[in-house]
Amino acid sequence: MGSYPQIRDFGDTGFSVEFGEGIDRAVNAMVMALHAALGEAALPGVIETIPSFRALLVQYDPLVTARVDLEAKVRAMLPDLTAAEHVGRLWRLPVCYAPDLAPDLNDVAERCKLAPEDVAARHAAGRFFVYMLGFMPGLAYMGGLEAALQLPRRKEPRLKVPPGSVAIAESMTTIYPWESPGGWHLIGRTPLRLFDAGRAEPTLLAPGDEVTCRAITAAEYEAMLAEVEAGRFDYAALQVTA
């Protein structure tokens, strides 16, 4: 495997800076540190940088900068890179764990040897870290699911998962922002839109953010959903400031 960081080719207009293996907060902190450093440096030709669990993708315009020159500048940054604690936003998101909105809750409870209400309570009590966005716009891969709730993905993925579905698999949890196929276990649903092109910031969550959940009733879910669909919901109120 060799030592890290490593730089690998990624197409003809990009390269990936890798900092380690697996899902690890310390490794991801280095990814986010380089992401921030390149954002501040504003190097000519850099189109965007995209963080993942363990690597940062650097995409550039070859008409503005040469790969060899840009890579040299990035390599020069690495020895002095400090993985300072990344301070993202803290969110408290409403989630309804009612059976009609949580089709896998009973199965998860049985396999984890817990009562369904205990699965819901344990998930709602968690504090999850957004490592990266992927698969579709707005879908956040969040780590920190407690060991008692960890299960492999479903053997048979669903062809249609409703938008807003709160799901778990392995050590991760996520919220599906769109109707899509999916193989994670659905244990709840939020009325929120995780991606909305009409908002000033279309994607609600970002890498480095942390998420907690607030259990809501089916009636609260329906009331919030009506506000969301009418464009009246105050997403800023979901940020925890203290």
Image (cartoon, grey):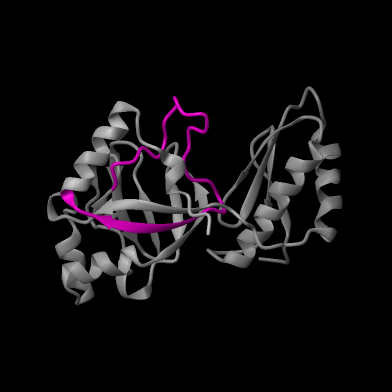
Tell me if 49 is positioned left or right of 117 in this view: right
Quadrant into which the N terminus falls: bottom right
Chief SS of the magenta region: loop
Could you tell me residue 118's position as x and y percent? 22, 71
Q: What segment is highlighted magenta in the picture? A: 190-218
What residue is shown at x 53% (from left), y 54% (from top)?
241
Q: Within the magenta stretch, is there residue 36? A: no
What residue is shown at x 72% (from left), y 51% (from top)?
34
Tell me if 78 is positioned left or right of 117 in this view: right
When the figure is inspected, residue 40 is found, relative to residue 120, above or below; the finding is: above
Could you tell me residue 181's position as x and y percent? 28, 41
Q: Image quarter for residue 186?
A: bottom left
Tell me if 37 is positioned left or right of 140 in this view: right
Comparing 222 with 36, the one in front is 222
When the figure is inspected, residue 187 is found, relative to residue 73, above or below; the finding is: below
Q: Image quarter for residue 43?
A: top right
Q: Within the magenta stretch, is there residue 198? A: yes
Comparing 230 with 37, the one in front is 230
Could you tell me residue 242's position as x and y percent? 53, 59
Tell me if 48 is positioned left or right of 234 in this view: right
What residue is shown at x 78% (from left), y 22% (from top)?
63
